[in-house]
Image: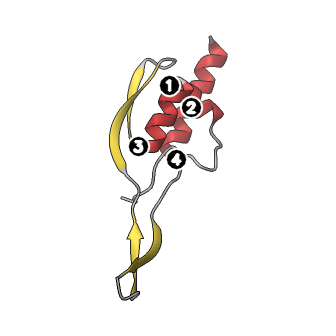
Amino acid sequence: MSRRCELTGKGPMSGNNVSHAKNRTRRRFLPNLTETALMSETLGRTFRLKVSSSALRTVDHRGGLDSFLLKAKDAELSAGALKIKKDIVKAQAAA
């Protein structure tokens, strides 16, 4: 499975390890991912997603998974998160 946040699209970056003698070797900076269960109030169920810790703070700040997904751009979301977003929009339209 890829090391990519399902909500923000944040992935690995590359850079240099720099020694005291200024020798440079390539390295990877991996995102801080955790698999968490997030609750959708509209759908009334939880979803397990691989999310970065910064995305978790953003979800809390925006008021939950539903409002985060409704404001998020479709290009940043994973296929699973996009399906959840479409289900939320459909459920809100029916209500």
Image vertical order of residue 80 relative to residue 29, above or below: above
Give the amino acid at mark 3. Ser
The crowding category of the residue bearing disc 2, from other C-alpha atoms within 10 Å (few below 14, some 14 to 19, many at least 20), is some
Please, what secondary structure does the residue beneath circle 4 have? helix
Mark 4 → mark 2, Cα distance in angstroms: 16 Å
Mark 3 → mark 2, Cα distance in angstroms: 14 Å
Task: State which tag comes first along the sequence, 1 or 3.
Answer: 3
What residue does disc 4 label? 79
Image vertical order of residue 26 relative to residue 52, above or below: below
Number of residue marks: 4
Q: Are marks 4 and 2 in contact (CB under 8 Å)?
A: no
Give the amino acid at mark 1. Gly
Viewer-nearest of labels 1 and 3? 3
What residue does disc 3 label? 53
Please, what secondary structure does the residue beneath circle 2 have? helix
What residue does disc 1 label? 64
What residue does disc 2 label? 68
Q: Are marks 2 and 1 in contact (CB under 8 Å)?
A: yes
Please, what secondary structure does the residue beneath circle 3 have? helix
